[in-house]
Image (cartoon, rainbow, N blue to C red):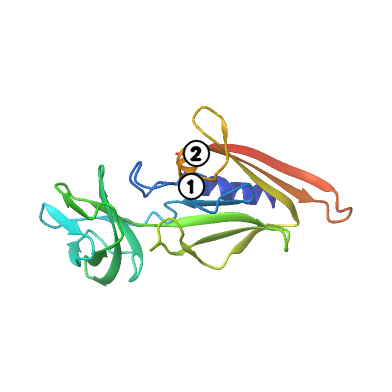
């Protein structure tokens, strides 16, 4: 159980920040701390490429249709990132037709308008949370259901990664290896490595039986 939980955490850390343009968003999200990790992550690898004529200009709150290579994996109501190089904008999927996504860029997005001179990539905006549930003595995992608020997603119901767990502890470090307390947006943005420790009890004696310790660099 410890190995399965550790493997799941490693997978999510490797996916952290993959869909977001570099420097555009915090990868470690609010609510993260010693017993909970919330991160923006490219979990599903759902993305496609625009095939329409260039340039493409997208403006906040103005609906637009994009011709794309494929629409597999996208669904109405989901938030996507439209990006190419350093240019990006968030948008909601309004409808889907054959090789066409109808989008409305977010009214709260920054920047509020962007022009793509090369074909942008469209990818789902996703997040994942892993946390310790003291009541059930379990490590649980959930994914985002709605990322309209990019910093505070709505979470789906959580599933158990491991049970009979005595603790889960996360530690956060900057690029120099100094520990960070995630009490400010600036500190969250400085996270480059995350260490975690999981402990499991011996169900017969209720004593600590084994533990897993690991550290992962953020991609």
Pointer 1 with pointer 2, Cβ within 8 A: yes
> Circle 1 sits in a helix, a strand or a loop, which is it?
loop
Residue 217 location (% of width, % of height): 51, 36
Q: Residue at x 85, y 49 (%)?
A: 207
Mark 1 and mark 2 lie on one chain; the one further toward the N terminus is 1
Q: Which residue is mark 2?
A: 191
The extreme right residue here reads 205
Residue 204 location (% of width, % of height): 88, 55
Q: Nearer the viewer, residue 130 or 179?
A: 179
**Considering only vertical position in the picture, is 213 above or below 99?**
above
Q: Residue at x 40, y 61 (%)?
A: 149
Q: Name the image quarter holding the C terminus.
A: top left
Q: Residue at x 60, y 64 (%)?
A: 159
**Residue 140 shows in this picture:** yes
**Residue 73 shows in this picture:** no
Quarter of the rendering containing residue 125? bottom left
Q: Nearer the viewer, residue 205 or 135?
A: 135
Q: Residues within 10 Å of mark 1 (few under 14, many from 20)?
A: many
Horizontal side of 90 relative to 43 (left or right) equals left
Q: Which residue is mark 1?
A: 28
């Amino acid at each position: 159980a410890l190995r399965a939980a550790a493997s799941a955490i490693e997978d999510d850390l490797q996916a952290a920040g993959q869909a977001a343009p570099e420097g555009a968003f915090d990868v470690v999200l609010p609510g993260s701390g010693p017993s909970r990790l919330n991160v923006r992550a490219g979990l599903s690898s759902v993305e496609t490429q625009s095939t329409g004529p260039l340039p493409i200009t997208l403006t906040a709150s103005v609906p637009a249709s994009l011709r794309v290579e494929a629409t597999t994996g996208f669904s109405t109501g989901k938030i996507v990132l439209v990006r190419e190089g350093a240019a990006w904008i968030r948008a909601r999927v309004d409808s889907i037709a054959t090789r066409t996504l109808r989008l409305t860029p977010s009214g709260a997005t920054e920047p509020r308008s962007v022009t793509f001179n090369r074909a942008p990539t469209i990818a789902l905006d996703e997040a994942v949370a892993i946390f310790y549930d003291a009541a059930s003595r379990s490590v649980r995992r959930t994914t985002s259901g709605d990322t309209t608020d990019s910093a505070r997603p709505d979470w789906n119901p959580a599933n158990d990664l491991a049970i009979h767990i005595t603790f889960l502890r996360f530690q956060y470090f900057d690029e120099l290896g100094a520990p960070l307390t995630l009490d400010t947006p600036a500190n969250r943005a400085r996270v480059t490595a995350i260490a975690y420790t999981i402990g499991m009890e011996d169900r017969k004696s209720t004593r600590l039986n084994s533990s897993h310790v690991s550290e992962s660099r953020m991609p």
